[in-house]
Image (tube, rainbow, N blue to C red):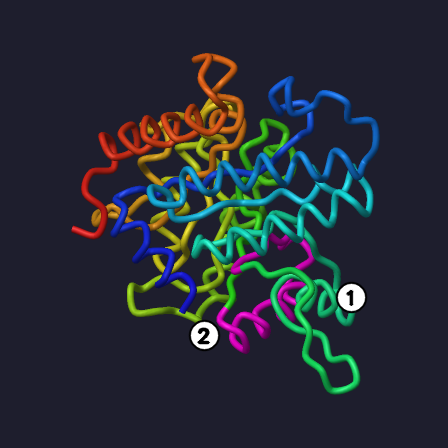
Amino acid sequence: MITDRLIEKIVEMQNPTCVGLDTLFDYLPDNMKQGVTTFDGVAERVFEFNKKIIDTVRDIVPSVKVQIAYYEMYGVAGMKAYEETLKYATEKELVVIADAKRNDIGSTASCYAKTFLGKTSVNGNELRAFPADYVTVNGYLGTDGIAPFVEECEKDDKGIFVLVKTSNPSGAEIQNLVLENGMPMYEHVGNLVEKWGESTVGKYGYSAVGAVVGATHPTEAERLRKTMPHTFFLIPGYGAQGGNAQMLKSCFGANGLGGVVNNSRGILCAYKKDGGTYYESARKACIAMQNDLSSVIGKMGK
């Protein structure tokens, strides 16, 4: 099961870090941007940048998250770089999270599920559009929008991360609304996520239906961890968004498991602070993050 594999890689490396490949062309070093005037050129350089990052950190981090918006903005060429990045990370045996935050209902949700998790039949040939292990989804359309994704998870050993408590400040405008029964909206959605994942719980007690829970909301995260014992967390907000290791400690269980922590700009742009090559600086940033998280979480899988 995919969450079991992610947990095993985290325990092996003693590192719950996910490198966010939210790669803006502007993040690239000046020498890589020089002379580029087309989307084709952008896509080529972005993929080159991503490959070097992957090659340099793949032995110390278990996963990468590829945010599709940073590629869609460069048109068809950007989407090709997105596809190539997913394929390359998969070939290097990283657990790959497609950060697309998709959803709809009925047949449209099924199409999204096939796009990012499953396969599409063309005259009997089963073809995969984008090779990822997980995709992020919006759960605020209810069960109709999630069921097709869970079906693909069960069919093809894939996973999803459902938005529950996001790291942005204005998320509270909706997610922290208190329902008639006194329960905040985010906790109600968390309970649904726990239920949606019941059929996919693996040997470590976590399901393939995970939750996005921001590091910037430790009080809410602690509450969710208690009410969602079988749900694995994707934790954004560390680093540039203001989250730190102490704030996200409550996302993890007593055995140091339960989540993977994303860091994008803090790794991709680390070279701008320390002056090294972008890939060497990215590796140093990953090691520093590993040490920071380990100092708070402790030994993972103990």
In the displayed structure image, the side of residue 272 where residue 143 appears, left or right: right
Residue 172 in which image quadrant: top right
Q: Name the residue under label 2.
A: 199
- Which residue shows up at 83% across the image and 27% down it? 37
Please indicate, yes or no, whether residue 12 appears anywhere in the rendered image: yes
Residue 141 locus on image (x, y percent): 69, 57
Q: Which of 9 and 58 is in front in this view?
A: 58
Foreground mark, 1 or 2? 1
Q: How crowded is mark 2: few (under 14 residues within 10 Å), some or many (20 or more)?
A: some
Instruction: Tell me the kind of residue under disc 2.
Output: Ser
Residue name at image x 56 percent, y 39 percent = 50
Q: Residue 150 carries which label?
A: none
Looking at the image, how many numbered discs can be counted on the residues?
2
N-terminal-most mark, 1 or 2: 1
Q: Nearer the viewer, residue 191 or 205?
A: 205
Residue 101 position (above or below residue 123): above
Mark 1 belongs to which amino acid? Thr
- In the image, what residue occupies the spot 59% across and 52% down? 86
- Where are the magenta residues, as a range? 133-157
